[in-house]
């Protein structure tokens, strides 16, 4: 447990490391370097005392033109303070690494609009709802003449993905594949309304699809602390 001395210096005794997460979808490392220099100017005594600095996530490495400022920030901390430096980016590493595969389970007309209900929900990708963005799907065709509002299958008001155009009419069982779903899906997904979490599959190097994890009612019960139908 860290304690703050009262001798006027902000020495946090017992602290082994610090974490800061100050970037968001950042393609430039200028701000990271500024943050590190700010820490250097304001908490040098603490930096001398600790063993590690975790610089959080929010870095879009593949879209960055140069890693120079990033290297400078890490080198500066390591050389001046002899600390272990690490990062924990999510979206920049796994954001494009996953698809969420769903199927159409119902189609109906509502006030002249075609609604296609999917066997998934915005609760599987809550950022769609939180940030009100329209996720990319593989089957969309810019000039497609068949338009559908894709909806999730819970009763959550706002369980909607948006309106999409297709070259062919959708049918029951049509596949809708949400792209770039590697980050902030499973970590944020919930089972609201009793809708199961999506199963996890991996593509193996030799092109096979292998089931890694399937969730069931037992998982739902255990999250609620219920074992053998008895609340803990
Ligand atoms: C402490 C911390 N580290 C890392 C991350 C990952 O961020 P990103 O996925 O944008 O790289 C987050 C995201 O909220 C975070 O809060």
Image (spheres, rainbow, N blue to C red):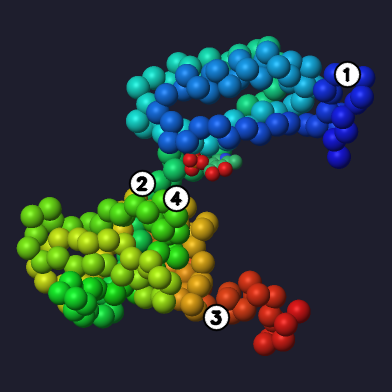
Of the image marks 4 and 2, the number of the one nearer the N terminus:
2
Q: Quick one: label 3, few (<14), some, or many (20+) residues within 10 Å? A: few
Mark drawn on residue 132? none
For marks 2 and 3, give the CA distance.
Answer: 29 Å
Secondary structure beneath label 1 = loop
User: In the rendered view, would you say 41 is above or below 136?
Assistant: above
Of the image marks 2 and 3, the number of the one nearer the N terminus:
2
Q: Are marks 4 and 2 in contact (CB under 8 Å)?
A: no
Secondary structure beneath label 2 = loop
Q: Quick one: label 1, few (<14), some, or many (20+) residues within 10 Å? A: few
Q: Residue at x 24, y 73 (%)?
A: 116
Of the image marks 3 and 4, the number of the one nearer the N terminus:
4
Q: Which residue is mark 2?
A: 96
Q: Is residue 172 visible?
A: no
Q: Is residue 104 visible?
A: yes
Q: Is mark 4 within 8 Å of ligand 1?
A: yes
The quadrant in which residue 65 appears is top left
Which quadrant would the N terminus be assigned to in this image?
A: top right
Q: Residue at x 77, y 21 (%)?
A: 46
User: In the rendered view, would you say 230 is above or below 5?
Assistant: below
Q: Which residue is mark 4?
A: 183
For marks 1 and 2, give the CA distance.
Answer: 48 Å
> How far across and how far down the image is residue 64, in percent?
37, 26
Of the image marks 1 and 2, the number of the one nearer the N terminus:
1
Q: Is mark 1 within 8 Å of ligand 1?
A: no
Ligand 1's quadrant is top right
Q: Is residue 218 left or right of residue 132?
A: right
> How far across and how far down the image is residue 93, in percent?
44, 41
Q: Which residue is mark 1?
A: 8
Q: Residue at x 37, y 54 (%)?
A: 132
């Amino acid at each position: 447990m860290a304690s703050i001395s009262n001798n006027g210096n902000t020495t946090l005794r017992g602290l082994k490391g610090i974490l800061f997460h100050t970037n968001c979808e950042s393609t430039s490392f200028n701000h990271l370097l500024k943050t590190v220099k700010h820490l250097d100017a304001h908490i040098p005594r603490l930096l001398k005392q600790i063993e590690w600095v975790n610089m959080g996530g929010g870095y879009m490495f593949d879209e960055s033109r140069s890693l120079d400022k990033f290297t400078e920030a890490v080198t500066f901390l390591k050389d001046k303070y002899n600390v272990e430096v690490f990062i924990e980016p999510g979206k920049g590493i796994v954001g494009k690494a996953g698809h969420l595969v769903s199927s159409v389970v119902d189609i109906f007309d509502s006030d002249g609009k075609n609604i296609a209900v999917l066997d998934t929900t915005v609760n599987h990708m809550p950022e769609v709802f939180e940030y009100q963005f329209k996720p990319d799907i593989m089957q969309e065709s810019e000039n497609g003449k068949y338009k559908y509002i894709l909806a999730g299958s819970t009763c959550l008001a706002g369980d909607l993905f948006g309106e999409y155009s297709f070259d062919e009419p959708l049918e029951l069982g049509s596949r809708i594949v949400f792209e770039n779903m590697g980050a902030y899906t499973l970590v944020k997904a919930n089972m609201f309304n009793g809708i199961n979490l999506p199963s996890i599959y991996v593509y193996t190097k030799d092109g096979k699809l292998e089931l890694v994890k399937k969730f069931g009612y037992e998982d739902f019960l255990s999250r609620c602390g219920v074992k053998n139908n008895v609340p803990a």
